[in-house]
Image: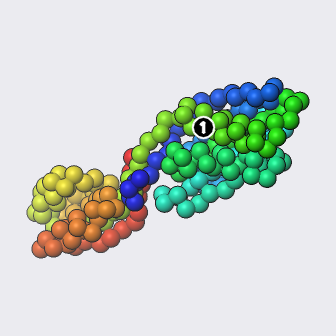
């Protein structure tokens, strides 16, 4: 991925079921941006699957893929959470939680069998989700007198920018977003126009 773009999912994927030697693995993918959201989804699944033995999961968050966590939930170390995380990384996904719920079928799978089963279930859950690409956008404010408004509009159209907010009065204000990789050059173009007051603002994600 480019350094100002990332992949994620916007809607929960459909439930999938993978079976291995009578064990059942139900897998789910959820969009998340915070740990409380993770806990909420886990609680929901524990309410749904009251007799399941393991709720193993992995999540990855951050526009730069910088945060992640895995949980084996009682399975042998690194036999569940890490294979799930591996699939999130293979699909280059962030802001996504994948949970695999296991019902033990009476036959032990061994560590190798568990790794394979959790990896397969996680892969199926991700494949049953709609993956989208998003850009990391930055924003800046342009203030000007009313007679300069049309110039702002022309520049927004010329450089294919987005106006997030606007205030059209005697003194006009526009909050404009631009893709991170183009920010410096676009900011300077506006900043060099006589009569514009330009200020860098906050970061904003855009679809």
- Front residue (pair 125, 23): 23
In the rendered image, residue 22, in percent from the top left (x then y), is placed at 81, 25
Q: Quadrant of residue 84?
A: top right
Q: Which residue is mark 1?
A: 123
- Front residue (pair 145, 92): 92
In this figure, what is the number of numbered marks?
Answer: 1
The structure residue drawn at horizontal position 57% and vertical position 37%, both measured from the top left corner, is 126
The structure residue drawn at horizontal position 41% and vertical position 49%, both measured from the top left corner, is 134
The structure residue drawn at horizontal position 13% and vertical position 71%, both measured from the top left corner, is 193
- Is residue 113 in sight in this rendering? yes
Q: Is residue 3 left or right of residue 18?
A: left
Dot 1: what SS? Answer: helix
Up/down of 96 relative to 168, above or below? above
Q: How is the image coloured?
A: rainbow
In the rendered image, residue 125, in percent from the top left (x then y), is placed at 60, 35
Q: Residue furthest right?
A: 106
- Front residue (pair 167, 185): 185
Q: Is residue 97 left or right of residue 55?
A: left
In the rendered image, residue 85, in percent from the top left (x then y), is placed at 63, 49
Mark 1 burial class by Cα count in 10 Å: few <14, some 14-19, many 20+: many
In the rendered image, residue 16, in percent from the top left (x then y), is placed at 65, 29
Q: Is residue 178 left or right of residue 121?
A: left
The structure residue drawn at horizontal position 44% and vertical position 52%, both measured from the top left corner, is 6
Up/down of 73 relative to 11, above or below? below
- Is residue 41 in sight in this rendering? no
- Front residue (pair 116, 9): 116
Q: Quadrant of residue 164?
A: bottom left
Q: Is residue 132 left or right of residue 14?
A: left
Q: Quadrant of residue 20?
A: top right
């Amino acid at each position: 991925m480019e350094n100002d773009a990332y992949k994620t999912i916007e809607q929960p994927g459909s439930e999938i079921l993978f079976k291995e030697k009578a064990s059942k693995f139900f897998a789910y993918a959820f969009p998340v941006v915070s740990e409380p959201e993770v806990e909420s989804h886990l609680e929901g699944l524990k309410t749904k699957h009251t007799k399941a033995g393991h709720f193993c999961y992995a999540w990855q968050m951050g526009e730069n893929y910088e945060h992640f966590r895995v949980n084996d939930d009682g399975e042998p170390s690194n036999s569940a959470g890490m294979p799930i995380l591996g699939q999130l990384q293979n699909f280059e996904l962030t802001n996504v939680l994948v949970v695999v719920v296991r019902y033990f079928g009476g036959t032990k799978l061994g560590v190798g069998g568990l790794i394979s089963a959790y990896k397969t279930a996680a892969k199926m859950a991700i494949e049953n989700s709609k993956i989208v690409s998003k850009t990391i956008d930055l924003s800046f404010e342009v203030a000007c007198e009313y007679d300069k408004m049309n110039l702002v509009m022309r520049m927004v159209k010329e450089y294919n920018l987005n106006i997030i907010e606007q205030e059209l009065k005697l003194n006009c204000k526009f909050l404009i977003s631009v893709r991170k990789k183009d920010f410096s050059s676009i900011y300077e173009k506006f900043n060099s126009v006589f009569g514009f007051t330009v200020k860098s603002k906050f970061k904003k994600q855009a679809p």
